[in-house]
Amino acid sequence: MNLDLFIVILYLTVIMITGIVASSNKKVKNVKEFSLSTRKYGTFVLVATLSAAFIGGGFSTGNAAKVAQIGIGNIIALFGFSLSVILIGKFVVPKIPKLILENNMSSTGEIMRESYGKNAQILTGFFAFMVCSGILGAQISSISYIFNVFLGLKPAHGMIIGMISVLISTSIGGMQSVVATEIIQFVILMIAMPVLLFISVQKAGGVLHIISQVSRENLDIFNKSGPLGLISLFISFAMGESMVPPYVQRLLMGTDLKTTSKATILSGILSIPFFVITGLVGLVGLVYFQGQQINTNSIMQSMINAVAPPGIRGILIAGTLSIVMSSASSFLNSASVELTNNVLEPIFGQNPQKSVLIVRIINILTGVVASVFAITVPNVLDILVYSYSFWSPVVLVPLIFALLGKKSTPQAFYASMFAGVFSVLACNFWGNPTKSYSEIVGILANLIVFCTVNKLQKKSKYL
């Protein structure tokens, strides 16, 4: 067995054992404990788990691939996500109503039920499950690329190995296992990516040589998209994963709102250099592989294969696995919790004795659904943009109002949900569903209808 393979196997083993050991500290008794863990966490743990949750395959290997394909504009677009995280930490988190925390709410559906009723909880749970499954699919797609490029495994085989590792480390202990593994993964990926860029720059001939060889098109932030395309993609990343279930879960896990606010802002700031680093790996890769046939969808993995010496290469492979497996664990946990807690239990009733078993079974089934999605849509970032249409045009606006404690009505939620869904479907009918325009149109339609219905109903009370 070579050194790199040994390091990868050791990493996967440590992650699985960590998840199992964390679950043994306290047995999970219900879905709420599966979702939120039984502990309240401080700043470092929250920064680690927030960062590990959102820095997935799309924001790392997918970013490197897109920069190689369209240029540095993709890095600028991803800053939209960084900005949204910082703004949420600054303005939304401090205003989360005490009622949400005191009632120990553990999911987006529960928060929506408090503001808009039981049916809103069910609908939110369904859309939450869809967006989490889609984003999980993006991570699974990245896992398959990693095992294919590094170990020569068929994508389907790599997908199976990756999903088994994630399922073992998350299905038993729920969120307490996820947090324990994410701390390890966060430390590894924060070391691995800067090391990869440093080695890549040296092997490609240095900074000045790389600048002289990169085409003008790849240095043009509007390349292949134009100003309107870049702005729409920026907004798409700003709103697409904004307040998705894994992040809402983590906003409810801090020792207090001040700690959570600080951790959220720090994780948003930390994402900026990370996006720059992973994007530049793709740009350097273009120079290194100049004149060679290469699949840009796996350019980060190809760079690790080409430039890293034995041992370091194994650590970098573990780093790329850390990126996608941490995000996969988070979205898998959220998908199963949302479907169980906010769809099945409200419809069929609660059964505390069977709820944990049910959520674990759904955890496994969700992995299968996400794998099918990953096979259907090959590009990681396209999977993300497609998945966003199940969330932000439908749930984002009413959810933010609920988290801010703003009074609104169930009718406003239903009307805005219909407007968002209809707008997205209409845009997709006349265009490409993986483009970000439909999502922006859907969000605007949702916002306008939500505010209009709220205003009209408030006026009617005084008539």
Image: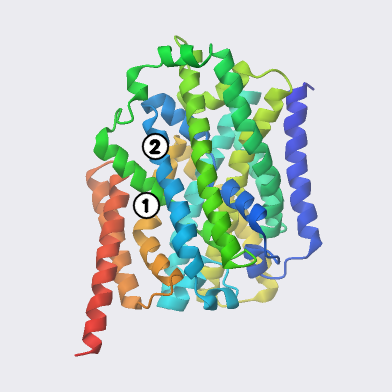
Residue 377 position, x and y percent, is 43, 38
Residue 45 position, x and y percent, is 66, 54
The answer to whether residue 192 of the structure is visible from this angle is yes
Please tell me which residue lies in front, 99 or 371. Answer: 99
Please tell me which residue lies in front, 101 or 313. Answer: 101
In-image side of 29 versus 449 (left or right): right
Task: Please tell me whether mark 2 sits on a helix, a strand or a loop.
Answer: helix
Distance, label 1 to label 2, CA atoms, is 21 Å
Task: Give the mark, 1 or 2, whose residue is nearer the N terminus.
Answer: 2
Task: Please tell me whether mark 1 sits on a helix, a strand or a loop.
Answer: loop
- Which quadrant would residue 314 be assigned to in this image? top right
Q: Which residue is mark 1?
A: 389
Residue 359 position, x and y percent, is 62, 63
Residue drawn at point x = 62 percent, y = 52 percent: 49
Q: Which residue is mark 2?
A: 76
Residue 19 position, x and y percent, is 74, 51
